Amino acid sequence: MYRFQVSAYTQTGESIALVGSTSELGLWDITRCIHLRTSADRYPLWWTDEIDIQPSGESGDGQSVEYKYVRFDAKSWGEWEGFGFNRWLPINHQHSGTIVVDDGAFGYLQPYPFGYTEQPTPVKQSLGEDNLKVVVIGSSVALGHKAWLLDGWVGQLEQALQQKYDHRVVNVSEVGANVSRTIARFGSVVTPEQPDIVIIALSLGNEGLAYCSPHERRAIQRRFESGLQQLVKMTRQLGARPILGSVYPNGDYSPEHYWLLQETHNRMLNWGVPILDWLAVLDNGQGRWRDGISFDPAHPNTIGHRLMYEAINLQLFDIDKAELAKENQHFWQPNEIPIYLDQAGFYVCACIAEKGLRISNPSKYSYTIAPYWQELQTVLQTKAGLLPGIYIAKNPQIGTLPFFAVQEDGAIATTVEILPGADVEYTASFNLFAPNNSQVLFYDGHLGILQKDEHHLWVINESDHEYNIHPMWKEVRNALKAMPAGVYEDPLHPEIPFRTMMIGNQGLESRVKLPPQSAVLFQYQCQLSDISRVAIVPLGDRCAVRMMLYKMEYDGPAFPFDLTRTTKIADIADIIENRFYDMWNPNFLHYNPEAGRIYHSKWSGLSFAHEVEDIDDPVNNMSPVYERMRVRYTARSQRFWYTIENCDQALFVRTGIGDRGGVIDLLNKLEKQCQSKPFQLLLLSPQNSDEFLDIPNVLHYNVEFNPDLMYDDLEHWMYCTEIMRKILESLGISSKNLFWCPPNVPVKR
């Protein structure tokens, strides 16, 4: 008996029917077709009742039936699916029970059919005392999905191992399983079987690689690889031999997916674990299936399953229990293996299974682990088995670096000071990426942000360059929404600048810097409301303030006056009082081709030098420039008001000559807009400070910051920046309490 089913999207009044080459299927007569049915809870799946298809009078196996589906419209006009070859299925003379023929999607004719029995009967095999039990844990491909009667690569391997070695195969795979799910199930489905060999057969496809955002691909890859290594370790802890099924194609992979697929495949080949190498026989050279071997993007068909089985080297299973026991002795060594000890008691132990290192210094002396300590480096290279990458401290201690970097040759590349009395255990950072060890919030192949628990997170920089993390990095900002809002600091080095991470409801709200080849632990300190965050808001007269903030790395997205020239302080006061309306109004903007600037007729001291681009023709057509200014300055003005409303204190900074009356007028208008919020006006101009004595909330420094001189002389630029830094420090402003405006602020409706 057979029951057919197909996925088909239809309009009201349409229906699906089946017609084929046997009398039961209408002998290709569309008027004798078999109509399928669907239901609200199962749509778009359509199915038939059971059909008894009798084999022809011909003897022997190999008989088949051909058929197609037809879509009928509301007027009973039939549309045949596809052109070319027909669907087909083999007729099984000996099979009893109902076979469900799953034909995938309407219009996509498969080169090989897929069907399965409704209630497969498990076959129990007896296991002799000397025979091996092989447990397979994987996903739907390991269960044989999309192979005819689910006789996939595992089923074929099972038959071969039983005939050749009398081994027993137990398949505990699960549809849709990924590494997280498999790790969670391992103890309940693999451990009770007491296996001798465990085949771990998972795919990057079930991790979501094909459909995730591009910036999430590296995190998925890293989690998958770490999860596989965790499963290998769990298998060895059972005393069993692990065998890994390699990665395999997916019909929706792009060239970048393929690059990641190959990278993971090549790394797996170097893990010292036997691999069932499927990629070479299934891949079309672009990460997708070869023609004719897949049923859908995620699954091979019967032919593909046969190729997977044929790629397996059966000699991997030509082993007895005695040989397995001997092989596993290597992995049952003591957890810590001493590899270095001196007369003062300083010693280093390697944790081979966990890829870790324990360093203990019971002496009264400090030790410096450095690349030039050749004796220790040689021992590490030959005995510790360290993998390249970052190692982090399980128990970070004040005064001791919480990380070190390992080179490709297994030597430590970082200088680490080990203080008297220190006892630190380091573990490979890739262990953190494994499911259930931490939550990977972000990973791009170099920078990793991992949530250790509700109040701790690790930020790991695997690159050779400093990483500058800031709110304008959209993916990172959004990733940190997963952490509870608050202030996080490096508890081991709280004095280092840019080691304060402020996280709000919209994610990251501060700048954080990480040295090359490093790892920093951030710990929750307090709520954002417990600190007073100061916003630095430039008010012209030129771009000097923004230039200096850029060199201090205190800069964020631009404010309205950052890239303008505003020679009159009265214009600043009036523009703010009018909430920037008309600042980019085309009726007041006039381009001067000789000066190469745009001048404002309402505020005569205002002009723009950075708005006309090379592709523009400002003499004949200013429309693109006007539109660009509208977009830019609308966003900049929104940031201005968002910053004033959301910071705890504001520091307005104005360069250029000013007069006492103009300053008092500006101060009054700022006070009105700040609505009782604490603020100061910092004036930086080459004039006597007596001009501004006794004006509340006003600070004046007799200095000149000329942006033209800064552009021409980097040393002068840095000199000015250092003066500005000292001024801000005197006001108690640093990276620890700076308010960072997001690039795209919420707009009030």
Image (spheres, rainbow, N blue to C red):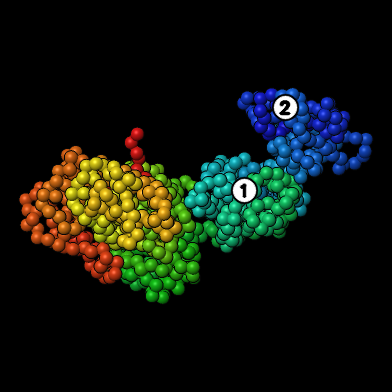
Query: What percent of the width, then of the height, locates residue 161?
Result: 73, 51
Query: What percent of the width, then of the height, locates residue 109?
Result: 74, 41
Query: What percent of the width, then of the height, locates residue 283?
Result: 67, 55
Asked whether residue 209 appears in the rendered view, the answer is: yes
**Residue at x 14% of width, y 62% of height:** 686
Asked whether residue 49 appears in the rendered view, the answer is: no
Front residue of 709/154: it is: 709
Total count of labels: 2
4 left or right of 604? right
Pointer 2: what residue? 73
Relative to 189, say whether 268 is above or below.
below
Pointer 1: what residue? 252
State the CA–CA distance, disc 2 to disc 1.
31 Å
Residue type at the position of mark 2:
Asp
Relative to 377, say whether 608 is above or below.
above
Residue type at the position of mark 1:
Asp
Query: What percent of the width, then of the height, locates residue 133?
Result: 66, 48
Relative to 467, say whether 156 is above or below.
above
- Asked which secondary structure carries label 1, the reply is loop
- Asked which secondary structure carries label 2, the reply is loop
Are circles 2 and 1 on residues that touch, CB within 8 Å?
no
**Residue at x 41% of width, y 49% of height:** 623
Q: Earlier in the sequence, mark 2 or mark 1?
A: 2
Q: Quadrant of residue 541?
A: bottom left
**Residue at x 64% of width, y 59% of height:** 323
